[in-house]
Image: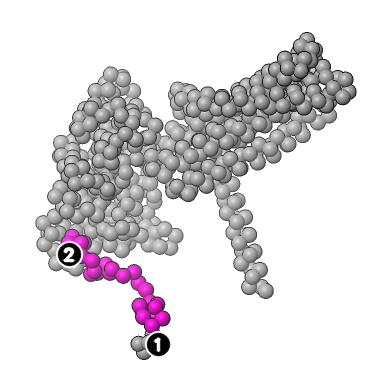
Amino acid sequence: MLKHIVPGIQNVGHRVIESIWRLGRASRFFILVLLKSGTSLRRFNLVIRELYFTGVLSLIIIVVSGLFVGMVLGLQGYETLQKYGSESAVGTLVALSLVRELGPVVAALLFASRAGSAITAEIGLMKATEQLAAMGMMAVDPIARVVAPRFWAGVISMPFLAAMFSVMGVFGGYLVTVVFIGVDEGSYWSQMQSAVDFRFDILNGFIKSCFFGVAVTAIAVFEGYDAPPTAEGVSGATTRTVVTSSLAILGLDFILTAFMFRGVS
Amino acid sequence: MTPETLIEVKDLNFSYDTRAILKGIHMTMPRGKVIAIMGGSGSGKTTLLRLISGAIQPTSGYVKFAGQIVHELDRDALFKLRRKMGMLFQFGALFTDLSVFDNVAFQIREHTNLPESMIRDLVLMKLHAVGLRGAHHLMPAELSGGMARRVALARSIALDPTLIMYDEPFTGLDPISLSVIGNLIRRLTDALGMTSIVVTHDVQESLKIVDYVYFIADGVIAAQGTPSEVRDSVAPFVHQFVHGEEDGPVPFHYPAQAYQKDLNLEDTFA
């Protein structure tokens, strides 16, 4: 009996110790990236190049998804609200759902699978093909030259992508409810305008997307840099980036929402 | 340590956890020579290069490069030292997102403030030296294995280093590329007054171009000498290695229990 239990406990212990080690390595790495960000800020063209790859190339998926999410919100919102005769409030429903929650969260989830995985795979492959080691041998720090620009590009793109998602969603809601169903255009916009508060809704959504941007990109660069330099290593790291950052986004979202909207109607 | 000595390795030990990789290595590498480090796979050759470049720390002993003990340097001093070193990785390790031109220009751009016109001239000169001036606009994915290795060579000499280390430069090359790389190593070493360390197990090609050979086996220097001494050596290990014999001091069979026992034939032949 004991023969079977002891290895099991050992196994659990080993995994716990291993994950605490990893967490420690990740924190140390994160601090290193921040400390070595000087190069990225001095030579901002390094960041601009990455902004194109992480930000601009993520636009299509963000725009299309935002449009469809807004359209679905409009449809569902109208279905429910018209039962109570308040279909004119559909604009408020669409805008608040997007700006407070869906914009930052869904955009971040899409960003994690589109850009986060790409960052991990790229850095992991650079490590596996000794490009990072070669850079170190040329007296160029790979964290400053490769990791930090990608990190900052991700952090900068995320709020813009989330904003883009919300804008497209509001437009999608407008298309479905006003153009197709025929809700009054004036009340769609004016109700939205009076209900959406800049401080509580837009600013809080923006803060959320900043947190998500830092979390997703930090996880992505760490997983890439920490990946075993083999094909399986890189593929495992890419999967972990998507899984870990999705969970981080949802967990952070709950915490941030609890702090931001407590007692706000 | 005389001024002619560039690298001095003294009583160098290195272990991963408890496994000893290098055990008490002594080496002296004079300036302007091509030195080969040979040995079977997993004998600690690449580890030695990593110790010379300061990528890892020795368990005991030291590597002295141009009078400085490498593992005692702090990060900034180490990076300063590495500007005098070039390294050619096994498969070139070119930056896949940069063109051939930008790969060679990388170090110059990172470490100097030279104007772009001068960088252009320098890069084209380096590429010309390896015969690939015409390929400056290509991406690494468009190069053959031998060309990629030559571009990497041009990249590692971009800042005229004192020392170049080659990690298995001959692996996976066709005979023509093989001798092109071999001759380039010799020519560039002489023309630029560098010192070269070639880690390899390609005996025939490297004996043609090197000045001195160290054999590493099981973490110690098993033999050393000039190419002609090595060719004529009667030491069993060197003889086996140079002539590529299947069995000898390095056995063909991985240690195992008796063959008959493994096949459960003991009773039959008892």
Is B256 covered by the magenta stretch?
yes
Residue A131 placed where, x, y %? 38, 39
Q: Chain of mark 1?
A: B
Is A126 covered by the magenta stretch?
no
Q: How many marks?
A: 2
Q: Magenta residues?
A: B240-265
- Magenta stretch mostly in which secondary structure? loop
- Label 2: which secondary element: helix
Residue B189 placed where, x, y %? 18, 40
Amino acid at the residue labelled 2: His
Q: Nearer the viewer, residue B81 or A136?
A: A136
- The structure residue drawn at horizontal position 56% and vertical position 48%, both measured from the top left corner, is A22
- The structure residue drawn at horizontal position 38% and vertical position 85%, both measured from the top left corner, is B266
Q: Nearer the viewer, residue B127 or A173?
A: A173
Identify the mark at residue B267; answer none if there is no mark.
1
Indicate which label's residue lies in the foreground, 2 or 1: 1
Reading the chain from its start, which is encountered first: label 2 or label 1?
Answer: 2
- Label 1: which secondary element: helix
Vertical order, B28 against B120 (above or below): below
Farthest-out residue, top: A186
Q: Provide the residue designation for mark 2.
A: B239
Amino acid at the residue labelled 1: Asp
Query: Share a chain, discs 2 and 1?
Result: yes
- The structure residue drawn at horizontal position 67% and vertical position 28%, both measured from the top left corner, is A104
Q: Chain of mark 2?
A: B
